[in-house]
Amino acid sequence: MKKATKVLTLALAMVMLAGVLTACGGGSKSGDTLTFGTNAEFPPFEFVTSSGVIGEYDGIDMAIAKKIADENGMTAAIENMEFDSLLIALQNGQIDAVIAGMTATDERRETVDFSTTYYTATQVMIVKEDSDIAKATDMADKKICVVQGYTGEVCVQEMGYTYEAFKKGTEAVLELVNGKCDVVVIDSATAQKYVGDNEGLKIVEDASAFESEEYAIAVRKGNTELLDKINSSIEKMLSDGTINELAVKYTEETTAE
Ligand code: ARG
């Protein structure tokens, strides 16, 4: 090849590569797939069932994800993974957004951007019905169970208590049911679900110890194109009562025997 042809070929290759990069980089055009990452171990927000709203995935978050995609002419897809892996997968580009009953914390805001809040929750304590735990400080000399990477773990850590962390909420609750731990600290709506599913448990709240937590959808930092779409969908679903209806529907459904 002559030098001029070589340069031309190289230039052409670079233009083609740039074209490929932009075609893959957006991920939020009409007709595209909008891939949400979640950890489907968190009823009533996300759980696995025989026929869910997106494939086998169902719950408040899954219904919200589907509506966001539908409204923007996209197809919602779910990637189910460990809770701890979600923000890394988002940064890697493996998923476009995270919807996982995820609390928008300052620490997480350092690495990702969060949407408008769509649900407000708080940490609560699940204990045996005959427990003498009445407030958070009563946990001081008790055996505490949390779920790894959840805000409940951070709370207990900040209180300076020792605890055991489990991979799943159901595992922590089983430990409590079996009398191997005294208290599980976890998000309120999920706690309601576990108490409904297991005999002999109750919820203890302590508003002075646990702040309210705002659930939001995470996107990569600076992905304002997608964030704007998500925010306008959320705002619409908040004002027309859709999110309220979903919360009622899935709270009843997942606690019914
Ligand atoms: N709200 C808590 C947090 O952000 C727990 C979320 C757990 N979500 C889940 N899909 N497993 O840390």
Image (spheres, helix red, strand yellow):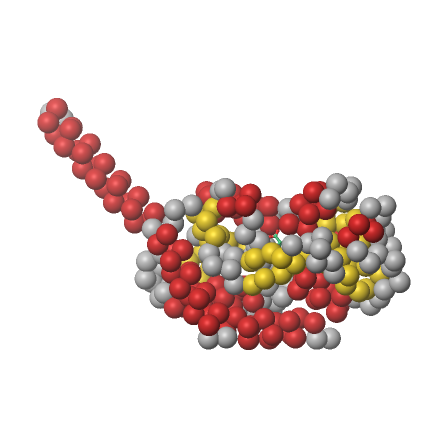
Query: What residue is at 86 percent from the left and 45 percent from the top?
Result: 141
Ligand 1 shown in quarter = bottom right
Left or right: 22 with respect to 214?
A: left
The residue at 70%/75% (across/down) is: 256
Q: Vertically, is 33 above or below 110? A: below
For residue 164, say whether it is visible. Answer: yes
In the rendered image, is residue 48 in sight?
no
Quarter that holds the C terminus: bottom right
Instruction: Give the position of the N terminus as an image quadrant.
Output: top left
Q: Quadrant of residue 154?
A: top right
| Quarter assignment of residue 214 | bottom right
Number of numbered labels in the structure image: 0
Residue 13 percent location from the top left of the image: 22, 37
Residue 12 in the image, given as x and y percentages of width and height:
18, 37
State left or right for residue 22 relative to residue 77: left
Q: Residue 100, position in %: x, y?
A: 56, 57
| Residue in front for this viewpoint, 252 or 158 | 158
